[in-house]
Image (cartoon, rainbow, N blue to C red):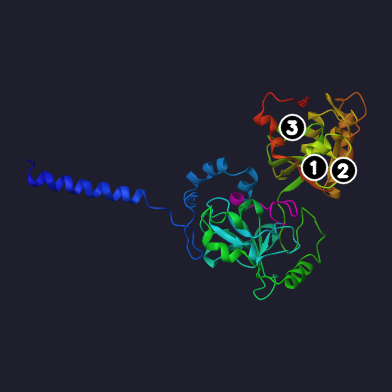
Amino acid sequence: MLSRHVLVYFSLLLFVVSGNLAACTKRAASVQPDSATTPAQAAPIAPSNPAIAKPDLRVRLSPLAYAVTQEGGTEPAFQNAYWDEHRPGLFVDVIDGTPLFSSADKFDSGTGWPSFTSPVRASAVTTRTDKTQGMDRVEVVSASSGAHLGHRFDDGPAPGHLRFCMNSAALRFVPLDALESEGYGAFRSLVQASSVPRSEAIACATSATSDAAPHDSAQGASGCRATTEVALLAGGCFWGMEELLRAVPGVLETTAGYTGGYTDHPTYDDVHTGRTGHAEAVRIVFDPQRVTFRSLLDDWFFRIHDPTTANRQGNDRGSQYRSAIFTTSEEQATEARAAKVRAERSGRWKDPVVTEIVPAGAFTAAEPEHQRYLERNPSGYTCHFRRD
């Protein structure tokens, strides 16, 4: 027969094990509008330990999201994911999933960045003074992850007159119909109706853009200034072009797509016929402090494809494979013309360089299967390589 001491021991052991099992079977609590917790599927990174957080974030985040959230960068205006997003839903921290902004508080500021009148709760963000770029601005930071989100200005619509000018790259959008499945069901009532009267939003947009050129991707309105730049380059099949360009130091994001044509919403099947006027191109978001537009052209664009063959690269023939630089500013146009002359005089090409230099128009991202195609299909076709 077991002694009393042994029985007590086993009783305590059984109690501890039972408690642990019970804890393991508890369901994670969903996020509440007045809670500082985050969904179970998005464990936060402690900003107080950068030695651990930074390497992990470099793996988890895209280069653009890392540059924005960890290095205080600003993405291009009118060329980011959510500036024109009008669906009801919730905008959460891209790092830890904390709810930050609601579609009900989003308005068209005319600046080219997603703008909000307020966060979903005041404690979701913190602010601090930003003295960069020769001015005093109010920087907005995620209270939970420490991520740089954007800036706050005092030119928003009534009654608060605040404008939270945010970076899309610092956010992730959760549509209304996905709130429950992602653990944000408690926020449904906060995202279904706009709290900003349209007349107020229009008035704010008019005021904000009165002293800034519309759709200027480098210089935004009312204090929001991009620290990144966009290049649109076409040089034959976008598979090979993107594979080489995405690895350039200083390039933060690449997207294969279609531009330069006269049809709306082009698809690969449309463009492949050569009858839409579109070229297969690569949209490049880059940090001009790390790689200049001139370097992208001289050291990469004019060396990774043949700019002397009109409407052809390798075995690909048709206007969709033409060599072209679609410029996003007058400065880019001037630099592109100079780079074309330098390519002509480089001695690298026997025939004249025929690269088109035209202002950029609408760009449509290609279908998902064409993004980073050669990364996923290393033996896929390409005629692109870097020449000496």
Q: Residue at x 88, y 25 (%)?
A: 349
Secondary structure category for the residue under label 1 = strand
In which quadrant is the C terminus drawn?
top right
Secondary structure category for the residue under label 2 = loop
Q: Is residue 81 magenta?
A: yes
For label 2, the residue is 261
Type of amino acid at the residue the image marks with label 3 = Trp
The single residue placed furthest to the bottom in the displayed view is 159
Type of amino acid at the residue the image marks with label 1 = Leu
Q: Are marks 1 and 2 in contact (CB under 8 Å)?
A: no
The disc placed on residue 239 is 3
Is 149 rendered above or below residue 379? below
Q: Is residue 368 magenta?
A: no
The Cα–Cα distance between marks 1 and 3, rounded to whole angstroms, is 15 Å
For label 1, the residue is 232
Residue 371 position in % (x across, y down): 70, 37
Q: Quadrant of residue 249?
A: top right
Residue 163 position in % (x across, y down): 67, 66
Q: Quadrant of residue 282?
A: top right
Q: Residue at x 80, y 42 (%)?
A: 232
Label 1, residues with CA under 10 Å away: few <14, some 14-19, many ≥20: many
The single residue placed furthest to the right in the displayed view is 352
